[in-house]
Image: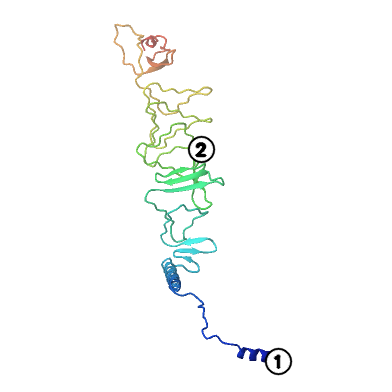
């Protein structure tokens, strides 16, 4: 012990002591202490309830390291298994189904698919209620990278299938011209081209061919049937050419008193307006003699 420590120790022992020392309490007492314990207990209960709710949510939502419930996060993106319901808009780049199952989009009202550009403007829309599509170009392909079966844009509609079959009772109705290289009916079925209230026009720069290989060809009209060739000729090639309901002119080279022989041969004559009529055949042409029939009709 050093000298200074000895002097201090002896001086403290000889100090006068007071007989009634005063003690001052240190800490929280009374109602403050009870409030503090109450808040600490409330905080502890809240923490326990929050922890229990967090564990319950994790258990119900099936949170795992890979994702949540049917939702799995993979390198390719997000994978959903089972039935999923979206209450708000869904923004994705691509939607694919599994290779062994189809992709089903179901709604109580309708399903609408929208495509927008970078400015948020609507560029394409597909509404699966009345199957309505709004887009600049619509294509249906046979498969991935396959040929185009159906294509539609503002200028034209292209059908790339081998056969177009219309099963409606009224057939196909076209409001304007139709351009096609071949028109053919089904086997054992008749082909009928009809215009109920207007004219039917078939045009081609190199000719129009109508062929009936194993049947009859019939053209019927209510008024005139015009066969016109501006530069060539009209060629009728058949074993028998019959013109029915032609008027017959009257011509007799025998005296009136003698009985008229039965006429079996006639001459085909033409009026200046193009109408045809028959005239009894004679040694020479009798068309001039019976030309008065052109004035009757």
* Whole-percent x, y for residue 90 in the image: 47, 53
Q: Earlier in the sequence, mark 2 or mark 1?
A: 1
Residue drawn where x is 38% and y is 26% of the image:
197
Query: How far is mark 2 from mark 1, CA to CA?
Result: 118 Å
* Whole-percent x, y for residue 182 in the image: 47, 37
Residues 187 and 5: in front is: 5
- Residue placed furthest toward the right: 3
Circle 2 Cα neighbour tier, 10 Å, few/some/many (<14 / 14–19 / ≥20): few
Q: Which residue is mark 2?
A: 156
Residues 148 and 19: in front is: 19
Residue 291 vs 194, above or below: the answer is above
Q: Secondary structure at mark 1?
A: helix
Residue 284 vs 179, above or below: the answer is above
Residue 42 vs 202, above or below: the answer is below
The quadrant of the picture occupied by the N terminus is: bottom right
The quadrant of the picture occupied by the C terminus is: top left
On screen, residue 294 versus residue 181, left or right, reads left
Q: Secondary structure at mark 2?
A: loop
State the mark number for residue 3. 1
Render colour scheme? rainbow
Residues 245 and 108: in front is: 108
Where, by quadrant of the figure, is residue 86 drawn?
bottom left
Residue 84 vs 120, above or below: the answer is below
On screen, residue 27 versus residue 165, left or right, reads right
């Amino acid at each position: 012990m050093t000298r200074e420590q000895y002097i201090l120790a002896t001086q403290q022992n000889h100090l006068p002591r007071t007989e009634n020392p005063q003690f001052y309490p240190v800490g929280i007492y009374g109602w403050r202490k009870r409030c503090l314990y109450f808040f600490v207990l409330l905080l502890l209960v809240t923490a326990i309830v929050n922890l229990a709710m967090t564990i319950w949510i994790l258990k119900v939502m099936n949170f795992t390291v890979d994702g949540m419930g049917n939702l799995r996060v993979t390198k390719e993106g997000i994978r959903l298994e089972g039935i999923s319901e979206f209450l708000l808009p869904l923004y994705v780049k691509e939607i694919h189904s599994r290779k062994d199952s189809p992709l089903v989009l179901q709604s109580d009202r309708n399903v609408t698919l929208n495509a927008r550009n970078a400015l948020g403007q609507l560029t394409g829309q597909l509404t699966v209620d009345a199957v309505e599509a709004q887009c600049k170009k619509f294509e249906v392909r046979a498969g991935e990278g396959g040929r185009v079966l159906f294509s539609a844009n503002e200028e034209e509609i292209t059908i790339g299938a081998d056969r177009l079959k219309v099963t409606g009772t009224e057939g196909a109705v076209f409001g304007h011209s139709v351009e096609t290289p071949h028109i053919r009916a089904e086997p054992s079925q008749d082909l009928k081209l009809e215009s109920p209230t207007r004219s039917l026009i078939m045009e081609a720069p190199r000719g129009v061919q109508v062929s009936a290989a194993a049947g009859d060809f019939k053209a019927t009209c209510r008024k005139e049937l015009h066969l016109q060739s501006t530069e060539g000729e009209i060629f009728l090639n058949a074993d028998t050419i019959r013109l029915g309901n032609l008027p017959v002119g009257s011509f007799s080279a025998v005296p009136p008193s003698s009985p008229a022989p039965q006429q079996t041969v006639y001459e085909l004559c033409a009026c200046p307006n193009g109408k045809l009529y028959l005239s009894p055949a004679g040694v020479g042409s009798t068309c001039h003699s019976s030309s008065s029939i052109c004035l009757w009709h």
